Amino acid sequence: NAGVTQTPKFRILKIGQSMTLQCTQDMNHNYMYWYRQDPGMGLKLIYYSVGAGITDKGEVPNGYNVSRSTTEDFPLRLELAAPSQTSVYFCASRVPEVEKLFFGSGTQLSVL
Amino acid sequence: GQQLNQSPQSMFIQEGEDVSMNCTSSSIFNTWLWYKQDPGEGPVLLIALYKAGELTSNGRLTAQFGITRKDSFLNISASIPSDVGIYFCAGQTQGGSEKLVFGKGTKLTVNP
C-alpha cells in the first residue's frame, strides 16, 4: 500500500493563479483532512471530509475549496493564490474508529 | 479557539541523553496524541493517550496524560541520532479529528 499520496511535492505560484493540490489514499479510509503548516507553527485544519460527497470547513478555510467525489481522492483547490497561502500542505486520512491520522509527505507551496 | 502551549520550542542534546517535553492547555482534553515529523515528511503518530493519569510507552518513548487533563508529557530515553525531528502534541475534545488542536512543536537535535 502507498498510504496517502500527495502531488506535487513543490510548487511556485504567482499571485492570482489557481491550482489544485492532489491527495489520494489507498487504505479505504472514510475520513480525510487538509492541514497547512506554517514555519514554527502547529498544523491548522483547512477542510475535512467524513465520506464521499461530504465536506466541511475547518479552522482556516478561507481561500480554499475541496471536493470528495470518491473515497480515495480529496483534492484541495486554491482559486486566487495569495502570499498568505505560502505554506506546507498536508493531507491526512483515518478510519472512523481510530484516532490515528496517516499523513502524506506534504506539498510545499510558495506564492510570489 | 483552544490553544496548546508546547515547550521547549527546541532542544539540542548529546546522543545518549534523556529528553522531556510537555504540552499544557487551559482547556480539558479527552485525548492526547504525540506525533513526530521527520524533515520533509508528514507527522507520524507515536503514542495515543485516552485516560487521565495514563502512562504509555513505545520503545524508548514514554508519554503521560496529566491528571488534570490539561497537560501531557513525552519523555525519550537514551536518545539516538534518528530521534532528530519535530515532535508535536495534539489534544482532542469530544468528537473526531476535526476537533484536534496541535501544539507548535518541539524541534529536537541530537549531536552524535
Image (cartoon, rainbow, N blue to C red):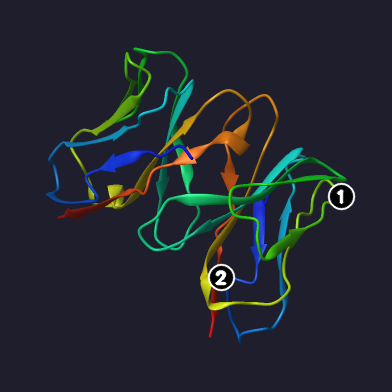
Tell me, yes or no, if residue B97 can be seen here: yes
Give the residue at mark 2.
A85
In terms of secondary structure, where does tag 1 sit? Answer: loop
Using residue A105 as the reference point, say whether residue B13 is left or right of it: left
Q: Is residue B63 above or below residue B55?
A: below
Seen as rendered, the residue at the extreme front is B1
Task: Name the amino acid, label 1.
Answer: Thr
Q: Residues within 10 Å of mark 2 (few under 14, many from 20)?
A: many
What amino acid does circle 2 point to? Gln
Residue B25 horizontal side relative to residue B7, left or right = right
- Considering depth in this image, is A46 or B56 the residue closer to the camera? A46
Crowdedness near tag 1: few (<14), some (14–19) or many (≥20) residues, C-alpha within 10 Å:
few
Q: Are marks 1 and 2 in contact (CB under 8 Å)?
A: no
**Residue A5 placed where, x, y %?**
66, 58
Question: In which quarter of the view is residue A98 placed?
Answer: top right
Residue that badge 1 annotates = A70
Q: Considering the image in quadrants, where does the C terminus of chain B appear? A: bottom left
